[in-house]
Image (cartoon, rainbow, N blue to C red):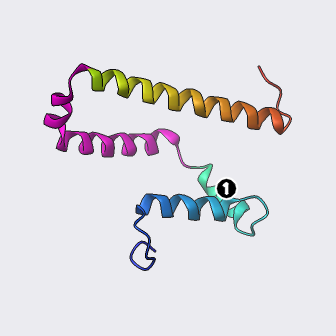
Amino acid sequence: MERELPFNISSILYISVIGIAIAFPGMPTSDFVLYYVSKVELLSIVTVFLAYVGIGMGKSWDEFKALGWRAIVITVLVIAATYYGAAIVAHIVLVATGVPAI
């Protein structure tokens, strides 16, 4: 799709959109996809993702070091804000779907 469509979007975005579309409740493929996705261990996915991030950082390590301590503070803040933002959205969705809040 990345080669055929005129948009300059990363392939990971295409993969994510297709995955969400075929796993969406009500789609004929959702039961099949959700069954097999539930069999995949999260740790194996995270390990590959972190390795990919590590390789990406390793290529520009000198540039990262040149940014200094401010970049480390900003990085930690961005990661924390992303985590808390995702937790807030998850909590809202869980409460909206009737799952009791702890």
Residue situated in front as seen by the camera: 35 or 18: 18
Percent coordinates x, y for residue 57 in the rendering? 24, 39
The C terminus lies in quadrant: top right
Q: Is residue 48 magenta?
A: yes
Q: Residue at x 26, y 45 (%)?
A: 56
Residue situated in front as seen by the camera: 98 or 63: 63
Q: Residue at x 70, y 67 (%)?
A: 29
Q: What residue type is labelled 1?
A: Leu
Which secondary structure class fits the magenta region best?
A: helix
Which stretch did the figure color magenta?
40-69
Left or right relative to 67: residue 88: right
Q: How many marks?
A: 1
Q: Which residue was labeled with disc 1?
A: 34
Q: Does the magenta stretch include residue 77?
A: no
Percent coordinates x, y for residue 8 in the rendering? 40, 67
Q: Splitting the image into 4 quarters, where does residue 28 fall?
A: bottom right
Instruction: Spot the residue most to the bottom.
Output: 4
Q: Which residue is drawn at 81% across and 32% down?
A: 95
Q: Residue at x 44, y 29 (%)?
A: 79
| Circle 1 crowding by C-alpha within 10 Å: few under 14, some 14–19, many from 20 | some
State whether residue 80 is above or below residue 10: above
Instruction: Spot the residue most to the right.
Output: 98
State whether residue 9 is above or below residue 47: below
